[in-house]
Amino acid sequence: MPKSRKIKKSDLNVSFNHAMIYARDVSRALHFYQDILGLKLIEAFPPGRPPVYARLRAGAGQTTIALHQAESDHQTPAEGIRLYFEVKELDALCEKLQAEGVTISQMPKLMPWGWRHAYLDDPDGHEVSLYWGGRKRFLKTDVNALKRAASK
């Protein structure tokens, strides 16, 4: 048996790969994520038939999502899950989505932490946040500014 070696935290280089989304109807979910939100299809399986699995890539960046057919008796629990997609042209995307019949539960709104968010649900009820954080996305939130804004 190989001897295990201690790994220092600084040696770890973990990268987020993808999120798996279980869907009751992969074709319907694929339409939402590909045709409405604009993600790019990498593959759908099985080819030439209604898919039970699909992988998509965000138009910008390196992130991917996978759509997987839920078992017929398997629920697609959406509670506690929210998917975040960053888009600079947030207002334009929300207008496009509304024109395509998507219900947006919160139109773009400036949040106390300085990002603008809009909220909607995917076809299986998974919460989706469309937002623009820009360079603030990688900065620590100014808690004192939040307190000052809340006291006004």
Image (cartoon, rainbow, N blue to C red):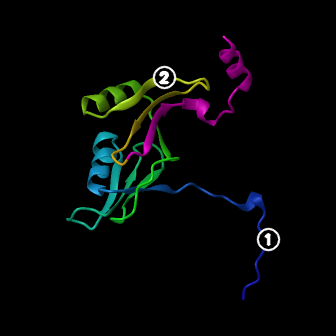
Number of numbered markers: 2
* Residue 138 lies in the magenta-colored region: yes
* Residue 34 lies in the magenta-colored region: no
How crowded is the residue under tag 1: few (<14 C-alpha within 10 Å), some, or many (20+)?
few
Find disc 1 in the rendering and name its residue: 6
Q: Which element type, helix, strand or loop, lies under badge 2?
A: strand
> What is the quadrant of residue 20 in the picture?
bottom left
* Labelled disc at residue 123: none
Left or right of 109? Residue 147 is: right
The x and y percentages for residue 7 are: 76, 67
Between residues 48 and 59, which one lies in front from this camera angle? 48
Residue interval drawn in magenta: 125-152
Where 112 sits versus 43, above or below? above
Where 22 sits versus 121, above or below? below
Where 53 sits versus 96, above or below? below
The x and y percentages for residue 131 are: 48, 32
How crowded is the residue under tag 2: few (<14 C-alpha within 10 Å), some, or many (20+)?
some
Left or right of 91? Residue 19 is: right
* Labelled disc at residue 109: 2
Q: Return the residue found at the far bottom.
A: 1
- Say which residue appears at 54% left-offset and 30% top-offset: 134
The x and y percentages for residue 3 are: 77, 83
> What is the quadrant of residue 148 in the picture?
top right
Left or right of 87? Residue 32 is: left
Circle 1: residue type = Lys
Quadrant that contains the N terminus: bottom right
- Say which residue appears at 27% left-offset and 51% top-offset: 28
Mark 2 in CB contact with mark 1 (< 8 angstroms): no
Q: Return the residue found at the far front.
A: 73
